Image: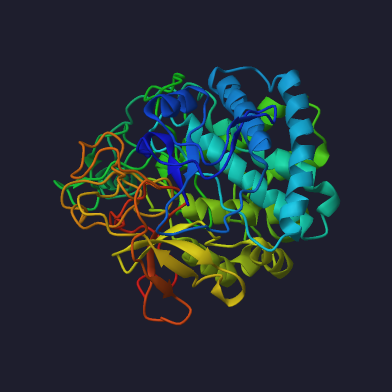
């Protein structure tokens, strides 16, 4: 079985896992064929992804972090948080606060069961079709909440896991809020005196090429590649960061593109990041007077701090950072390493994991990184990975020593069906001409990228509708020369190669 975006499921596919409403009632049981009208209705219910049968890969021990009704309630509540922030609500509404507190308690109960289980949970995907970015923000908040909760449960803050979940859900609300008007430009400076000095400094700064705008291009568009003038770069994927509400003149707009969500440990300081750096203070102002507890506030306030003093917003050093916040900051940095930013492609999970082991102790402490490394599983079963830039497969075993080099069952090659826009991971840009995809590309039976013209072959062919195909298994623990080169947590996934902006940080060991 595979997790597939609803709009990418071909009619005739068979549902592999029962779908539930937010009240816990089943709405469609496993084994039911998905007709065109059913798929349309699922979308209208807000269901974006389904598990469908794929005979070629059989059963996969994939575990989702939360019970489906709980996940649906959390998703809806976070959408309401996003709407309130985007709309410029003066504070988190109290009814929503109470619902979030209650949900966080339920989430912790379910995460305790996951933590005690044998299989690591699969992250939640982002919808491939972009809205204004709100869905990406919600998916990011949900996944950060899961990771923060599991991290808390694994260490000395296990009694405060609910606070960790709440903080992870709310800490980035400031990314969504309307930006305050920018200050008026200063009057022109008088001519600089001859012979150098500050005037020369200003001219030198003015000669530098400005940073590209710290926001993705609208979905489906391309933008100038800062690394290669004249070359058109892929439009950034829709799920890199949150939703912004600031347009060029600083006035709020619910449909403007989001700012980056920089990590001080990963992203060198840029002028273009300044609006995003303010999101922590904005969130704190939004939560001022909201009854959440002191620990939640500390976690929110310090979720981008690091011990070397280079974090933000306050540049706290060493023990000035709350020990609980060191944990939240490390978990946040890991998730941002995967998400990337317009100036930096998202890293592969094993790259981010290795980076965390190498740099994390210095930035957040040995104890924190030990706990975090214990709960992080870069490729849980059900992950989709591409091997050596070629075939895509699904992770079937990543336990023990296979945590970074899992066992992968390859997806069948279905002539005429390329891969589409990605749901997560490197190479998420929409497939384009020349991306190496097309006839012969691997992929689930009958799946074409959303919006793509009908591919060759029966249109009704979808996951689970055909006979099992002969596929192989790659055990990356044994085949040490083979590498994961792209990943996703739901189909369709992209085979587009990563594009590294000039000067962008890269994980240690990239390209090995
Ligand atoms: Fe943040």
Residue 274 location in percent, x, y? 47, 39
16 sits to left or right of 153:
left
Ligand 1 quadrant assignment: top right
Query: Quick one: quadrant of the C terminus?
Result: bottom left
Q: Nearer the viewer, residue 499 or 199?
A: 499
Q: Position of residue 305 (x, y in %)?
A: 64, 51
Using the image as rendered, state which of residue 139 and residue 91 is in the foreground: 139
Quadrant in the picture for residue 286? top right
From where the camera sits, is residue 321 visible?
A: no
Q: Is residue 71 rendered to the left or right of residue 451?
A: right
The x, y position of residue 242, in whole percent, is: 49, 36
Q: Is residue 153 visible?
A: yes
State whether residue 463 is above or below residue 484: above
Residue at 32%, 49% in the rendered image: 445
Say if 330 sits above or below 107 in the image.
Answer: below
Q: Nearer the viewer, residue 387 or 96?
A: 387
Single out the residue that lies furthest toward the left.
230
Residue at image location 24% in from the left, 53% down from the top: 227
- Describe residue 341's horizontal placement relative to residue 162 as left or right: left
């Amino acid at each position: 079985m595979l997790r597939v975006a609803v709009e990418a499921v071909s009619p005739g596919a068979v549902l592999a896992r029962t779908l539930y409403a937010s009240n816990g009632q089943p709405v469609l049981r496993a084994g039911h064929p998905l007709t065109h009208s059913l798929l349309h209705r699922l979308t209208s219910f807000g269901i974006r992804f389904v598990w469908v049968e794929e005979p070629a890969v059989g059963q996969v021990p994939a575990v989702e972090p939360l019970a489906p009704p709980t996940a649906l309630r959390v998703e809806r509540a976070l959408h309401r948080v996003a709407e309130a922030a985007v709309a410029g609500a003066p504070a988190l509404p109290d009814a929503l606060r109470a619902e979030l507190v209650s949900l966080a308690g339920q989430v912790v109960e379910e995460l305790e069961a996951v933590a005690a289980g044998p299989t690591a949970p699969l992250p939640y995907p982002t919808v491939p079709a972009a809205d204004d970015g709100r869905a990406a923000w919600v998916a990011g908040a949900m996944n950060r909440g899961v990771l923060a909760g599991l991290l808390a449960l694994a260490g000395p803050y296990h009694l405060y896991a609910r606070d960790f979940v709440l903080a992870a859900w709310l800490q980035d609300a400031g990314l969504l809020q309307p930006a305050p008007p920018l200050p008026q430009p200063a009057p022109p400076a008088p001519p600089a005196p001859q012979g150098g000095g500050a005037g020369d400094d200003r001219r030198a700064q003015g000669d530098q090429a400005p940073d590209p705008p710290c926001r993705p291009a609208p979905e489906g568009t391309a933008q100038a590649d800062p690394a290669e003038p004249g070359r058109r770069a892929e439009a950034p994927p829709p799920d890199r960061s949150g939703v912004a509400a600031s347009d060029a003149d600083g006035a709020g707009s619910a449909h403007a593109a989001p700012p980056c969500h920089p990590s001080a440990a990963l992203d060198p300081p840029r002028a273009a990041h300044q609006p995003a750096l303010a999101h922590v203070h904005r969130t704190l102002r939004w939560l001022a007077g909201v009854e959440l507890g002191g620990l939640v506030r500390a976690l929110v306030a310090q979720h981008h701090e690091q011990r070397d003093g280079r974090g933000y917003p306050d540049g706290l050093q060493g023990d000035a950072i709350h020990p609980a916040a060191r944990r939240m900051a490390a978990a946040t940095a890991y998730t941002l390493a995967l998400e990337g930013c317009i100036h930096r492609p998202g890293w592969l999970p094993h790259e981010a994991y290795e980076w965390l082991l190498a740099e994390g102790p210095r930035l957040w402490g040995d104890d924190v990184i030990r706990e975090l490394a214990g709960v992080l599983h870069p490729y849980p079963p059900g992950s989709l990975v591409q091997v050596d830039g070629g075939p895509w497969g699904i992770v079937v075993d990543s336990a023990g020593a296979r945590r970074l080099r899992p066992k992968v069952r390859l997806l069948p090659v279905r002539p005429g069906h390329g891969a589409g826009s990605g749901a997560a991971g490197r190479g998420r840009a929409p497939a384009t001409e020349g991306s190496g995809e097309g006839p012969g590309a691997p992929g689930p039976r009958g799946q074409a990228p959303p919006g793509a013209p009908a591919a060759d072959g029966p249109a009704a062919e979808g996951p689970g509708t055909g006979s099992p195909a002969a596929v192989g298994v790659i055990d990356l623990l044994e085949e040490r020369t083979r590498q994961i080169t792209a990943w996703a947590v739901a189909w369709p996934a992209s085979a587009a190669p990563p594009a590294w902006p000039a000067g962008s940080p890269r994980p240690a060991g990239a390209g090995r």
